[in-house]
Amino acid sequence: MSTPLVLCDVEEPAALGAGLSQWDGQAISWRDMGVKYPNADFAKSMKYTIDLIAKHCGLRVEIRTSQRANLESYYKRIDGPQGVLARQYLPGRPSPLTQSKSGEWDRGEMNWLTQQYLDVITNHEIVHGVGIGHHNGEPSLMNSNINIDFHGKLDEWTIDELQLRYGLPRTVDEPGDPPGPPTAPVFDWVHFTREVAKEMLSLLPEEE
C-alpha cells in the first residue's frame, strides 16, 4: 500500500517519573471480548504473539475464555477503512492485576487483513498492553505506522523494553504446560536408597 497505515493511535501514559508502565509480576491474562474476525485466525495471531513475547522475556500471557482478564480485546468502529487499525491502552505504574485494560480492533479494517497483517497488529497491540509505548526513531514493531517487516521477529529496542520490565526469558515450557516456572526435577529414589545403604554399611564394625 502506498499510504502508510496508522497501526494505532493509543495515547502514551502520563509522565511516570522514575517508574515504568508495566504489570506486577511475570504473568498476565488476555481475553477476546468479541473481535469478529474469524476466530481461528485471531487465535493464531494471539498464539503467535504469546510465543514471541515469551521467547524474548520472562512474561507469560494466559488466554482466558470466561473470567475477566488483564487485557481484553473488543471489536468496534474506530474510524473506518484505511485509518487507525487498532488501539490498546497501556497499564499504569504499576497496574494492579485486577484492573483490565481494553484493546479495540477497527471493524472497518477487518475485510482486507491477511494473517500476516493480523499477526503484526496483534503483536504490536499486546506489546502496548504489557506497558511499552510507540517508538518512531528507527524501524520497529512499535512504530505508529504498521511495519510488516517485523512479522516473525522483534527489534532490539522492543526486546530491551520487554526485558527491562519482565526480565530475561525463562526456560521454555513443555508443550501443553500452563504458563509458569519450569517443573522441579523428579526425586531419584533409587539413587537415594543406594546412597543410604552405602552409608549404613560404612558404619558397621569391621570384621576381625
Image: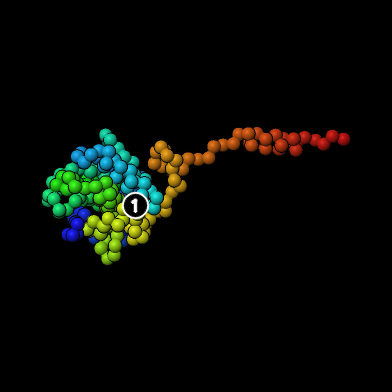
Residue found at the very far right of the displayed protein:
208
Residue found at the very far bottom of the displayed protein:
137
Residue at image point 63% right, 34% down:
190
Residue 106 or 169: which is nearer the viewer? 106
Residue of label 1: 152
Compared to residue 122, the image places residue 38 above or below, namely above
Compared to residue 9, the image places residue 181 above or below, namely above
Total count of labels: 1
Residue at image point 41% right, 37% down:
176
Residue at image point 65% right, 34% down:
193
Residue found at the very far front of the displayed protein:
1
Image quadrant assignment for residue 66: top left
Amino acid bearing label 1: Gly
Q: How far from the left and from the top, in percent, is residue 130?
A: 30, 50
Tell me: 176 left or right of 72: right
Which image quadrant: the N terminus? bottom left
Residue 10 visible in the current orientation: no
